[in-house]
Structure formats: structure tokens, C-alpha cells
């Protein structure tokens, strides 16, 4: 079988180590995450605020800076057929990879675009820092061509960010991130602050980009509706761990982990007014995680073993793995 | 029919820009609606549709340019501010911004009791606070001596609701009450509104962009677009069989958590918001797939279509 894994993590632990009045405080944001993200797929990561999903993205994008530290495990990219451990790369190599190999689309587009320069100047700065442009007009022509390809109006190049609507700004950010045709695009809640109609437009653009470039998108959002519309596979994250991973249809039709189960079944649906319940209790603090399975204080099926030990992954079906004692002890290993 | 709150021809105009390039934006444009006792009424729409401005006017944070607000048959007058706010309490979007991080949460409760003279002694006050907290699944013990940072967003939102209940209001205005609450806890807040309506007969003005929770919890709904109410009726009428092209677009754009209903087709987005506010005639005309000549010239009145109000020229044949 051909190996299509482009982005892999193996038993990744990433913690923030803070110094609070001389005492070290550890925030365990990513705990034991095994991911194997394929080429030409949209991988969704779902989780609530404070579950460590943004930290995981930082690790994936090789943007780990103190106080965040990789405690153990590793992140590898497959570049030109060879797996490369990200921690062995130099600053300069990372800078080269960024935006050309792996691009990042953040949540707040207003804080990304420089408010005092026109969109065309942002494009020029961006292009000039990555490609050697010999003529002044060349960068502009490239930007124009790219926008036309994505179906965005070229006149926005002359606008300042505040003159554009939120949806248009977010689409400009996506256009910027995809300009150099990166193999991996990481989106951190790219549609969260947007209205539903605009959100649909942005998701449409992301899908178009992926279909054109045949690359990989890692999309983080807490909105299960967006995942249902765009993701091929979904990983459910809870307290720094991926507790369940499966193709999108399976996550929605056969959620297996109790947390996933609650998450899916608490969503209101049109045409169905039957009572829905939230997960009991509150999400745990990453600075003070419960022992064993971190979901055990809220789980209605809790057993003794859950309080003591975290289970590994059990394959309940092909491509569907769950970390829960209800389905078995499970194992850890190199994610396929 | 008894009406708890009536909003009539409410208009709010903001002026933007300097003396030279002044633009007047009508954020709320001649809207009318009413809320019945023991009813959850949703005011829904995208950002910039004027729903929060409407709520701020009702709560008295903004002055209306014109129009009236009638509460239990009485207009708001200056000397009746206390009576007015006692009957109408509010909760807000961001539970972490509602509470000052340096003040104990219980102080907000005692302050409300003092402002409305709800108790004669401290013991009586604590009893009242405890009773209201129990309605939202907490007790006075749970928050005595604690600061906001010791609670989760969901808990703080419950505490906000308990605080609002102190005055025994007939109406709670909830401005996006669940959009900042963790996904796994949202339904617990929404269910609480249902419980308050059914057990205490409290009405809720639920302001939201989330039509799925609106459908789940509300009785009637008004959809706003660029300052106008474009469609109003029961949630079944408006959300299950939307008539206005904008409501149809909005409804179709909601990402449903169901892989069988993925989005189909392409949509058009507006480039800037200001253009639509300043548009003549129907403000949706620039993006409407069914646009006619008359839409660009004449602002559509509200037509009665099978009991729902729809502001769209497509329904001009039916009686006004």
C-alpha cells in the first residue's frame, strides 16, 4: 500500500510550563496524541474551548515557542517522499516551509491584515518575502491571477481591510494562505466569527481550494455542523486527547465514545423538538486534569478502572478508533 | 390578546463619518413586534441586522430615534425606570465580561436586592438569593465568597440568569446567551429558558444568530435583515417553510450536523455591509435570486401569508 500520510504525530505531549511566583505550573494541553493525516483529505478536529486544539495546531505547524514545549513524542512531515522530524529543522528551514509547504488560516482576519496598508501591499510583502520577484508588476499580476482563479473580485486589491466585510476579509486571508499552493493548510476556527451565510461562502472557498490543489486541510472548529459539511475524517478532542477518530459519516451515525455521543445528540435539529441534554458537569482545567480518563467525572458510564488509567485506542471498525474502557483496553502505536 | 411587551415603529439612526462625508445608517428601521406572557420570542439575524440595537433600546441603554415601547400597557417614562427595569431584566453574551473579575459574584446579587429593595435583612436576602439559584441548579453555598474565575462559562451564565430572576421579572432579554458557552453545555442553558417559561411563566426575548437553537426553544420568531423585520411568525412557519428569499437563504446556509444534508450549489455574498443599508427599496434586492424591478424602487410592506408576516413583493397578490 502506498503511504499517503503527509502529517503524523506519535505520542505527542505538548505542555505549557509557566513560572507562577517561583512555582512551576504545568498546563497539559496536548496529551498523547497520535494522528496520521493523509494527502488529499480534509481532517476535522472538534473540541470545546480549552481542550487543547489550538495548541495541537501550533505543534502541527511547528510554531512551538516557550512557554509551550514538546515534552515527548514527535511531529513529522512527509516532504518529497521522506518523513522529516520537525524538531530537527533549523529556523531557516522552518521559515522556508511556512506558507510554501504548510499554511495557516487564523480565526480573526481583522488582526491578520494590516489595517493601514491596502490589500495589494499585503500581497506584495507576502510574495516578495517568499519568491524573488524581479519586476514591480510581477507580484501584482500574480495576486490578480490568483484572486480571479478563486472567484474573488480583483478590485479588492485596492481596498483597505476595514472597507471589506468580515466574510470578504476572511476569504482574502484564505487566498493569501493558498497563494503559494501549500501542501497542508491549517485552519484554526476560520469561520467561527462569521455569519451563517458568510460562513457557507468561506467553507465553499476552502473546499474549492482543496479540490484544486488536492492538498490536505486540517480544520479545527467546535461547530459540528461545519464538520458535517466539509470534513472527510474527524478527530474528537477532549482535555488534550483525541478520544475518538472516524470518517465523518461514522462520527454522526455511530458515535461511540460517551463524550462524542453527548456532543452529537445535544445538537438541535430542525423539525425535531424533542428535549436535548448537554453533557453534565463542566470541562476540566488543563492545569489540573482528573486522573485516568479525563472524561470520567462527567461520564454516565464511569467504572473503577476509568478513574485510574487512560485506555489506548481500540479499533471498533476500519478507520474508526476509540479510547474508552467501554470498548476495550486498546493500544498505542504508530497511527496508520 | 394580552401583550407583555409591545414595540411599535421603532427606529434608530446612527450617524457615521465626519462633517464632510456623513453617512446615516438606519440600524433599526420601523420595526414592530409584541411578546406575549410566558412566551419565548426570538429576534434572529446575522450580525449588523439590528437585533442587538433593538435589545439595547428596550433595556434603555440607547434612545430610540422614534417609536414606542409599551410594557404591560404602559409606556416607559423617566419616573418609572425602576418599575420598568424590575419587570424586564437582561443577560448578556459573554459571561466572563458580565462580571468584574475582582468582585465576588455574590456582590452582584446583594446589589440588585439593594437597588430594588427586595429584602429587609441580610438573612432574608440570602434566602431569596438561594431560592433563585436553586431554580438554575445551584445554591448560595456554591458561590458564597467566590470570584468569577472560579466558575466555568456555563455556570456564570446560569448565575447571570439567577441574578436576573431576583426581581421576579416578567421578561428576560437574553442577547446571544449561548454563543460564548461551551458546545457541550449550551443545551443546559437553553433548556433553562424552557423551564422558566413553563414553570414560572417568564417570557424571554431570545436574541440570536443560531436558528437551530431558536427552533428548539422558541414559540415565535422574527427574522431581521439590515434593520428590517423581513419575516415573522411561529418557528414552524418561519423556519420549516420560510417564505422570504432571505430567510430561505439563511435557513439553507445553516450547517446541519447531518452528513446527508451537505450544502448544494453556490451562493453570493455582499462585498460590503454599508451598500445594503443605504439601498433603495428592498435591501436584499442586490443578492436576491427572485429580484424584480419593483424591489429596487419600493420598500416592500409586510404581507400576511398564511398567518406569517412577510416583507417581500413576491407576495403582493395576497392581501396586506
Image (spheres, rainbow, N blue to C red):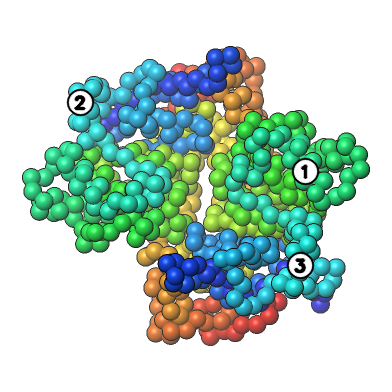
Where residue B227 appears, as percent x and y from the top left, is 49, 26
- Which residue lies most toward the left here? B120
Residue bearing the label numbered 2: B80
Secondary structure at badge 1 equals helix
Where residue A86 appears, as percent x and y from the top left, is 73, 70
Chain letter of disc 1?
Answer: A
Residue bearing the label numbered 1: A125
- Report, in whole angstroms, how far the alpha carbon at label 1 lies from the one at label 3: 23 Å
Where residue A267 appears, as percent x and y from the top left, is 47, 56
Q: Nearer the viewer, residue B39 or A49?
A: A49
Q: Identify whether B192 is placed above or below B281.
A: below
Residue bearing the label numbered 3: A90
Mark 1 vs mark 3: which is more N-terminal? 3
Where residue A15 appears, as percent x and y from the top left, is 55, 70
Chain letter of disc 2?
Answer: B
Q: Nearer the viewer, residue B111 or A306?
A: B111
Q: Which mark is residue B274?
A: none
In the visual, does B4 lie left or right of B96?
A: left
Q: Pointers 2 and 1 in contact (CB under 8 A)?
A: no
Q: Pointers 3 and 2 in contact (CB under 8 A)?
A: no
Q: Is residue B292 visible?
A: yes
Amino acid at each position: 500500500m502506498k503511504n499517503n500520510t503527509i502529517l503524523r504525530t506519535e505520542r505527542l505531549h505538548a505542555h505549557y510550563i509557566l513560572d507562577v511566583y517561583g512555582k512551576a505550573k504545568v498546563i497539559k494541553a496536548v496529551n498523547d496524541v497520535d494522528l496520521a493525516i493523509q494527502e488529499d483529505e480534509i481532517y476535522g478536529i472538534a473540541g470545546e474551548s480549552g481542550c487543547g486544539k489550538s495548541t495541537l495546531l501550533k505543534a502541527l505547524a511547528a510554531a512551538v515557542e516557550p512557554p509551550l514545549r514538546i515534552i515527548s513524542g514527535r511531529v513529522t512531515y512527509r516532504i518529497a517522499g521522506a518523513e522529516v522530524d520537525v524538531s530537527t529543522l533549523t529556523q531557516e528551514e522552518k521559515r522556508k516551509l511556512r506558507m510554501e509547504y504548510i499554511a495557516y488560516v487564523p480565526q480573526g482576519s481583522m488582526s491578520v491584515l494590516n489595517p493601514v496598508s491596502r490589500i495589494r501591499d499585503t500581497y506584495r510583502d507576502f510574495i516578495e518575502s517568499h519568491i524573488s520577484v524581479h519586476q514591480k508588476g510581477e507580484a501584482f499580476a500574480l495576486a490578480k491571477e490568483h484572486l480571479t482563479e478563486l472567484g474573488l473580485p480583483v478590485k479588492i486589491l485596492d481596498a483597505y481591510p476595514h472597507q471589506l466585510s468580515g466574510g470578504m476579509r476572511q476569504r482574502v486571508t484564505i487566498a493569501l494562505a493558498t497563494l503559494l499552493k501549500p501542501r497542508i493548510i491549517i485552519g484554526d476556527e476560520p469561520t467561527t466569527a462569521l455569519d451563517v451565510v458568510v460562513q457557507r461562502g468561506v467553507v465553499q472557498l476552502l473546499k474549492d481550494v482543496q479540490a484544486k490543489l488536492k492538498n490536505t486541510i486540517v480544520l479545527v472548529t467546535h461547530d459540528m455542523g461545519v464538520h458535517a459539511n466539509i470534513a472527510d475524517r474527524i478527530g474528537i478532542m477532549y482535555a488534550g486527547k483525541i478520544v475518538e477518530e472516524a470518517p465523518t459519516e461514522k462520527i454522526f451515525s455511530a458515535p461511540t465514545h460517551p463524550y462524542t455521543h453527548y456532543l452529537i445528540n445535544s445538537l438541535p435539529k430542525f423539525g425535531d423538538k424533542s428535549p436535548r441534554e448537554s453533557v453534565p458537569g463542566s470541562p476540566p482545567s488543563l492545569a489540573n486534569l482528573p486522573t485516568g480518563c479525563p472524561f470520567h467525572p462527567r461520564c454516565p458510564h464511569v467504572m473503577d478502572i476509568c478513574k485510574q488509567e487512560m485506555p489506548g485506542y481500540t479499533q471498533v471498525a476500519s478507520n474508526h478508533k476509540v479510547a474508552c474502557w467501554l470498548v476495550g483496553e486498546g493500544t498505542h502505536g504508530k497511527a496508520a | 390578546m394580552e401583550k407583555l411587551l409591545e414595540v411599535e415603529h421603532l427606529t434608530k439612526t446612527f450617524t457615521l463619518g465626519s462633517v464632510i462625508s456623513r453617512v446615516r445608517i438606519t440600524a433599526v428601521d420601523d420595526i414592530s413586534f409584541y411578546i406575549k406572557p410566558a412566551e419565548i420570542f426570538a429576534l434572529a439575524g446575522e450580525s449588523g441586522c439590528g437585533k442587538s440595537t433593538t435589545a439595547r433600546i428596550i433595556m434603555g441603554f440607547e434612545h430610540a430615534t422614534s417609536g414606542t415601547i409599551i410594557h404591560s400597557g404602559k409606556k416607559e417614562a423617566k419616573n418609572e425606570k425602576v418599575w420598568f427595569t424590575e419587570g424586564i431584566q437582561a443577560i448578556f453574551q459573554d459571561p466572563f465580561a458580565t462580571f468584574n473579575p475582582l468582585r465576588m459574584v455574590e456582590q452582584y446579587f446583594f446589589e440588585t436586592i439593594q437597588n430594588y429593595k427586595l429584602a429587609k435583612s441580610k438573612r432574608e436576602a440570602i434566602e431569596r438569593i438561594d431560592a433563585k439559584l436553586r431554580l438554575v441548579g445551584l445554591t448560595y453555598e456554591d458561590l458564597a465568597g467566590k470570584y468569577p474565575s472560579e466558575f466555568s462559562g456555563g455556570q456564570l451564565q446560569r448565575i447571570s440568569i439567577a441574578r436576573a430572576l431576583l426581581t421576579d421579572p416578567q421578561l428576560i432579554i437574553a442577547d446571544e446567551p449561548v454563543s460564548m458557552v461551551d458546545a457541550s453545555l449550551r443545551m443546559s442553558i437553553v433548556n433553562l429558558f424552557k423551564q422558566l417559561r413553563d414553570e414560572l411563566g417568564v417570557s424571554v426575548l431570545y436574541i440570536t444568530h443560531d436558528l437551530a437553537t431558536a427552533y428548539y426553544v422558541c414559540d415565535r420568531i422574527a427574522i431581521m435583515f439590515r434593520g428590517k423585520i423581513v419575516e415573522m411568525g411561529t418557528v414552524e412557519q418561519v423556519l420549516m417553510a420560510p417564505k422570504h428569499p432571505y430567510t430561505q437563504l439563511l435557513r439553507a446556509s445553516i450547517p446541519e450536523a447531518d452528513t446527508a444534508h451537505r450544502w448544494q450549489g453556490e451562493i453570493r455574498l455582499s462585498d460590503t455591509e454599508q451598500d445594503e443599508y443605504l439601498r433603495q427599496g428592498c435591501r436584499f434586492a442586490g443578492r436576491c435570486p427572485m429580484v424584480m424591478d419593483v424591489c429596487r424602487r419600493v420598500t416592500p410592506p409586510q404581507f400576511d401569508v398564511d398567518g406569517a408576516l412577510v416583507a417581500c413583493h413576491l407576495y403582493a397578490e395576497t392581501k396586506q
